Amino acid sequence: MKKNIPVTQPYLPELKEFIPYLEQIWDNKWLTNNGPFHQKLEAELCGFLGVKHISLFTNATIALVTALQALRISGEVITTPYSFVATSHSIIWNNLKPVFVDIEPGTFNIDPAKIEAAITPNTTAIMPVHCYGNPCQVDKIQKIADDYGLKIIYDAAHAFNIDYKGESLLNHGDLSILSFHATKVFNTFEGGAIICKDEKIKQRIDKLKNFGFTDEVTVTAPGINGKMSEVNAAFGLLQLKYVQGAIDKRSIIDKCYRKLLDGIQGIVIPDFDENACGNYSYFPILITSDFPVSRDCVYNTLKAQGILSRRYFYPLISNMPIYRSLSSASHENLANANLIAEQVLCLPIYSDLALDDCSYIVKIIKSIS
């Protein structure tokens, strides 16, 4: 019998648990602009994630745009083509030039060995992505940045609650940007955040997300409206009570997939860094040339059975019309990224996904072979 299985689904606590938060907002009559729930969520997230400062945003895209402003980035920013478009869009919105370099075939993260060759006198920053929550080679990237005097802004949209070598992955680089979109492990309906280690930078970020106001009558920077509302922040506080349990359930699903898919010729399951803990936000596989049919055939077969997988990330950012004219977007420059984009398929994973549904999905994949 045909099932309807989405690629992901947000974890939602019982609605009755959220009502008291809404009642308090109604009593406060404070809906946005650094209200009590906003302040409390920032404080609790700092403790939960093991970071020094966090600034909440209405979404991660505005946070990325603001991060580049906060560090006064100019000229060129080296980044990855294997990401969601918001990564490079934020660079364009700041009137900067994205410079794409290839990814590592094993991790899908930006290849540090390719970064140095892409540096020019106009390069001022690197914007890597912790793809699927798998940590970038942060030590190598930091050394390159130190050697050339560059800033590092990590797009950490997938990296909520990832520890690396015993500390939060979010503490690497100058800034890290989180997404709290509805599709993420931790969500506030829509939302995002910037992680930083310096109080003065935190103050600048907070000004920039509030139009650049320093006080009631003084505007000192061309800021934007990036503030998170009290309703979003309140939902985040409720979500925070349950997020570890949701991650633990995802872990069981991840293990189930790995066991069921093991040994199928032509299907590759990427390894996760052994020095890091995962949040199991995605379950990517590669459908290689050794499999009897193409990735798109698998995608369409699953879809016909009501199973929504996702070719994430396809197409590459560098192959989109607004970017493909860049010299760094050439296929020759991005051989690994282009190959992975043609092979990758993210299977459904969310905390309420039944293990029987995992078996059903894999059974269909095996039937194609």
Image (spheres, rainbow, N blue to C red):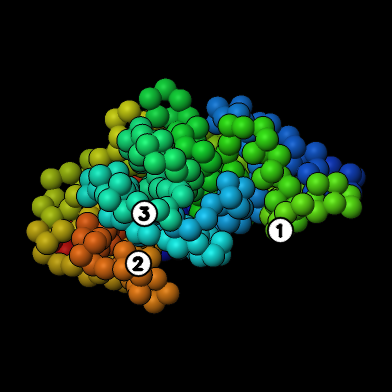
Residue 293 position, x and y percent, is: 15, 67
The answer to whether 272 is drawn above or below residue 327 in the figure is: above
* Circle number at residue 120: 3
Q: How many marks?
A: 3
Q: Amino acid at mark 1?
A: Pro
Q: Point out the tag, 2 or 1, that comes first from the N-terminus.
A: 1
User: Does residue 222 appear in the picture of this structure?
Assistant: yes
Residue 110 position, x and y percent, is: 32, 49
Query: In whole angstroms, how far apart are the C-alphas of marks 1 and 3?
Result: 28 Å
Image quadrant in which you'd find residue 122:
bottom left
SS class, disc 2: helix
The answer to whether 369 is drawn above or below residue 323 in the figure is: above
Q: Is residue 123 left or right of residue 27?
A: left
Q: Nearer the viewer, residue 366 or 43?
A: 43
Q: Amino acid at mark 2?
A: Ser
As drawn, which residue projects farthest toward the bottom? 321
Disc 2 target residue: 318
Q: Nearer the viewer, residue 133 or 261?
A: 133
Query: In whole angstroms, how far apart are the C-alphas of marks 2 and 1?
Result: 29 Å
Disc 1 target residue: 222
Q: Of tags 1 and 3, which is closer to the observer?
A: 3
Which residue is at 78% across, 44% downward? 34
Q: Point out the tag, 2 or 3, that comes first from the N-terminus.
A: 3
Query: In whole angstroms, how far apart are the C-alphas of marks 2 and 3?
Result: 19 Å
Q: Nearer the viewer, residue 366 or 41?
A: 41
Which residue is at 81% across, 43% downward? 35
